[in-house]
Amino acid sequence: MKESAITLRRKWVAARITACAQALAEERGIDGFTMDDVAECAGVSRRTLFNYVPGKLDAILGVPPDPDPALFSEFLAGGPTGRLGDDVRAIVGALLESKDSEPGDVERVRRLIASDVRLHKAMHERFGKVTTFFAEAILTREGPDADPLRGRAVATVTLALFDLALHNFVADPKTSLVDHYMRAFDSAATLFD
């Protein structure tokens, strides 16, 4: 499905805000710049800036991608294949394909997170929210008799594989992030055969 000009513009502005916030954080430290500095660097108004991010940490970490609504609805309904593992692999792969990731950007975020406990905590909270969201989606998909522990385990393992893929992407930028994720997922899947 082709993205609208508005969607593409929103992605571009969000990416610009994040790039500016990260550059300022690397140059001056988190406490060395203001949200006004980010807005000026990104070429947006303060009001526009806050329509994209609620604060400095979110500006640095970036706007998380949203899953494709049609694919997510299909996942909740038990698709696309009817096998949970294959469908998790497909939805995460599609999500990663929708985000333009550069190894240098990933490495910079990792450095920033390692350099400041506030960013580390904020990223940990994000991962917790994503894990909860994904676990709830799995439980919705699996129905009223679904095991909450299974949903949480699948979501947690999926995020761990994503983190491994990010690490490998920085080390081997010739291979795409989505391909690194697929390799990590497939390797993990063999553990349970």
Image (spheres, helix red, strand yellow):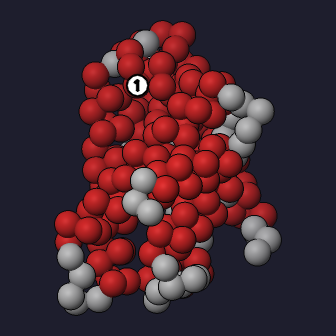
Examine the rendered structure and indicate whether residue 173 appears above or below residue 190.
above
Q: Which residue is mark 1?
A: 113
Instruction: Residue 26: tell me if it is visible.
Output: yes
The residue under the point 35% across, 62% down is 154
Q: Nearer the viewer, residue 78 or 71?
A: 78
Q: Quadrant of the N terminus?
A: bottom right
Q: Return the residue found at the far front.
A: 193
- Farthest residue, direction top: 28
Residue 154 falls left or right of residue 145: right
User: Element type at marker 1?
Assistant: helix
Q: Residue at x 44, y 63 (%)?
A: 193
**Quadrant of the rendered structure where residue 34 is?**
top left
Where residue 5 appears, x then y in whole percent?
78, 64
Position of 167 with respect to 29 (left or right) is right
**x and y, in percent, of residue 139 in the image:** 29, 78
Side (left or right) of 22 relative to 128: right
Residue 132 visible in the displayed image: no
